[in-house]
Amino acid sequence: MQLECFRGADFSQVSARARKALGEDAMILHTRTVRDDGVPRVEVLAATTDTLEHVRERLQATALPTPLRRASGRPYVIALVGPTGAGKTTTAAKLAVRPGTFGIGRPGLLTIDTYRVGGMDQLATYAELANVPFDVVYDASEIGDAFSRLRDCDVIIVDTPGRSPNAADVTDRWRTLLDALKPDEVHLVLPATIRGDLALAAERAYRTSSSHVGATHVMLSKLDEVPGERGVTDLALSLALPTRWITDGQDVPADLAPAVPRLLRSLGLGVDADDAWTAA
């Protein structure tokens, strides 16, 4: 993928430089006026014609199965993992509470974050207000009963503890419990403000290992806290995981959106999807 920035005295000069570097059919994505030592300059962000499709392919998650529920009757299980403060609990509530997130599929909430009482209470409150089934699992032996109580759900959103992946003693216990849940998808939730090196370290820590299931997707949260979103797309691409949703605020359930259209727009790449919510 080529995505480059060019500056010059006027637009025709800069666009000519872009076409020379990237080809005659180069796309101009962004244009703005900047100042270099007080002198006005034109800046353009340009890309090769295959950029849109290349970026989309790198980011796009496969569609959720239809129907969500397996032939055995087991619900589809989506788990959220990640560091403390990433917004996993609020995101779990958004996914479960927002109408149409899973089409006509009925969601349920389950938490294995029994270390933080406030998080359990927060999810329970959202679930009660939205009439979404909710359960708590403390031990692997309780999973069967929990799934039985959530038997009317087509998809179950699992909230996990916000513990450092390096806290081996605690982390190993809840990741073993997560393994027992056999999630179909594991979304690594990271705040958009995270440093790139820390994001890569988190991705490495949550990879599939011989002992535990690992992250299958990345979900960037708190996009409202970054001044510009182009870097957010670069972050998503660097993690080399598909992405299905992003979050951009604390409002439950409003601040949740399909990820790829939003990330492509941050690059100035036109996409067919509009701002209205569509199920992932």
Image (cartoon, rainbow, N blue to C red):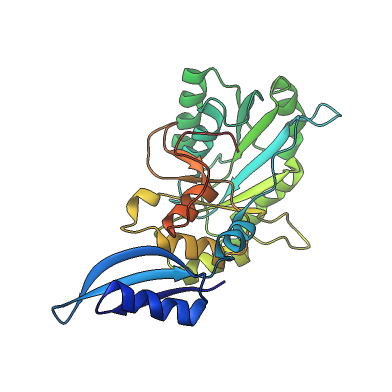
Q: Which residue occupies 49% across, 46% down?
A: 246
Query: What is the quadrant of the N terminus in the image?
Result: bottom right
Q: How many marks?
A: 0
Q: Is residue 252 left or right of residue 68?
A: left
In the displayed structure, would residue 59 be above or below residue 158? below
Q: Is residue 256 left or right of residue 241?
A: left
Q: Which residue occupies 48% across, 82% down?
A: 21
Q: Which residue occupies 34% across, 59% down?
A: 228
In the displayed structure, would residue 202 be above or below residue 254? below
Q: Nearer the viewer, residue 177 or 100?
A: 100
Which picture quadrant has residue 133?
top right
In the displayed structure, would residue 37 be above or below residue 191? below
Q: Position of residue 216 (x, y in %)?
A: 67, 54
Q: Position of residue 190 (x, y in %)?
A: 49, 55
* Residue 194 showing in the rendered view: no
Q: Position of residue 184 (x, y in %)?
A: 73, 43
- Looking at the image, the residue that sits furthest to the right is 72
Query: What is the quadrant of the C terminus in the image?
Result: top right
Q: Nearer the viewer, residue 123 or 31?
A: 31
* Residue 96 showing in the rendered view: yes
Q: Position of residue 209 (x, y in %)?
A: 74, 63
Q: Is residue 157 left or right of residue 23?
A: right
Which picture quadrant has residue 77?
top right
Q: Which residue occupies 24% across, 79% down?
A: 9
